[in-house]
Image (spheres, rainbow, N blue to C red):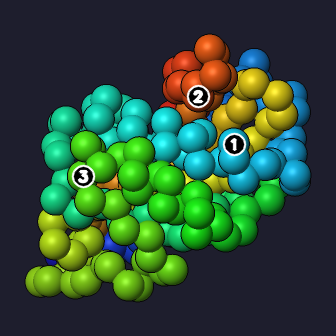
């Protein structure tokens, strides 16, 4: 029976890592959907702000742990947000944006973009985990227009180490900053 529980836990954690989830209350529902013409010059600073907050604030429930390796999927995943209200869009994060994000987060840790979870998730003794004691992060598309947007993010460390949430991000004085958590998703 313990083997069945372990397999079930791995499947649940993998589902969270690949699809992510966040739960919106009715008052937190986005009123504007993703702008399909999100300028490239806006995407990199928004994602950099989201990743910095997620990795350094303790919001991710990893106890302020600094990861020796930070892996980020090289494409946004539309289903990272709440299943009943996923953000539209998704798609590849352009190479110039990936480079800008990596530079912006050089003080947080080494960021590497990967094309799939399979590139970094390994299994040891029945508990799938990210190689090199790292974290795998999945970003949702930038959801909204103007100077206030939402971005869903999920992180996966191991079979019982995953979390997801959606941030409110706003532009003030020419810089994008996380203004708060719009919705908390599951934590394992």
Q: From mark 1 to mark 2, how far is it between C-alphas?
A: 9 Å
What's the residue at 32%, 42% (across, down)? 55
Res 176 label: 2
Mark positioned earlier in the residue sequence (3 or 1): 1
Q: Are marks 1 and 2 in contact (CB under 8 Å)?
A: yes
Horizontal side of 179 relative to 147 (left or right) equals left
Residue projecting furthest to the top = 173
Q: From mark 2 to mark 3, how far is it between C-alphas?
A: 20 Å
Q: Is residue 64 above or below residue 38?
A: above
Q: Is residue 85 visible?
A: no
Mark positioned earlier in the residue sequence (2 or 3): 3
What's the residue at 50%, 53% (across, down)? 100
Q: Are marks 2 and 3 in contact (CB under 8 Å)?
A: no
Q: From mark 3 to mark 1, how far is it between C-alphas?
A: 22 Å
What's the residue at 55%, 46% (across, down)? 47
Give the residue number, with chain letter if any, for mark 1.
42
Residue 30 at x, y = what percent?
79, 31
Res 109 label: 3
How packed mark 2 is, by other alpha carbons closer than 10 Å (few <14, some 14-19, many 20 or more), is many
What's the residue at 82%, 54% (across, down)? 88
Q: Is residue 126 visible?
A: yes
Classify residue 112 by image quadrant.
Answer: bottom left
Classify residue 171 by image quadrant.
Answer: top right
């Amino acid at each position: 029976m313990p083997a069945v529980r372990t397999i079930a836990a791995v499947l649940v954690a993998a589902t969270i890592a690949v699809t992510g989830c966040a739960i919106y209350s009715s008052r937190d529902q986005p009123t504007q959907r993703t702008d399909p013409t999100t300028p490239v010059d806006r995407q990199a600073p928004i994602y950099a702000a989201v990743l910095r907050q997620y990795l350094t604030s303790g919001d991710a429930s990893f106890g302020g742990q600094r990861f020796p390796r930070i892996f980020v999927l090289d494409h946004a995943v539309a289903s990272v947000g709440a299943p009943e209200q996923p953000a539209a869009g998704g798609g590849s994060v352009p190479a110039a944006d990936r480079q800008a994000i990596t530079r912006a987060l050089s003080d947080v840790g080494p960021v590497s973009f990967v094309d799939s979870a399979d590139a970094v998730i390994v299994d040891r003794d029945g508990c799938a985990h990210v190689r090199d004691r790292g974290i795998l992060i999945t970003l949702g598309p930038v959801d909204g227009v103007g100077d206030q947007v939402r971005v869903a993010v999920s992180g996966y460390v191991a079979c019982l180490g995953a979390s997801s949430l959606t941030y409110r991000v706003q532009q003030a004085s020419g810089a994008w900053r996380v203004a708060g958590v719009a919705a908390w998703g599951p934590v394992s």
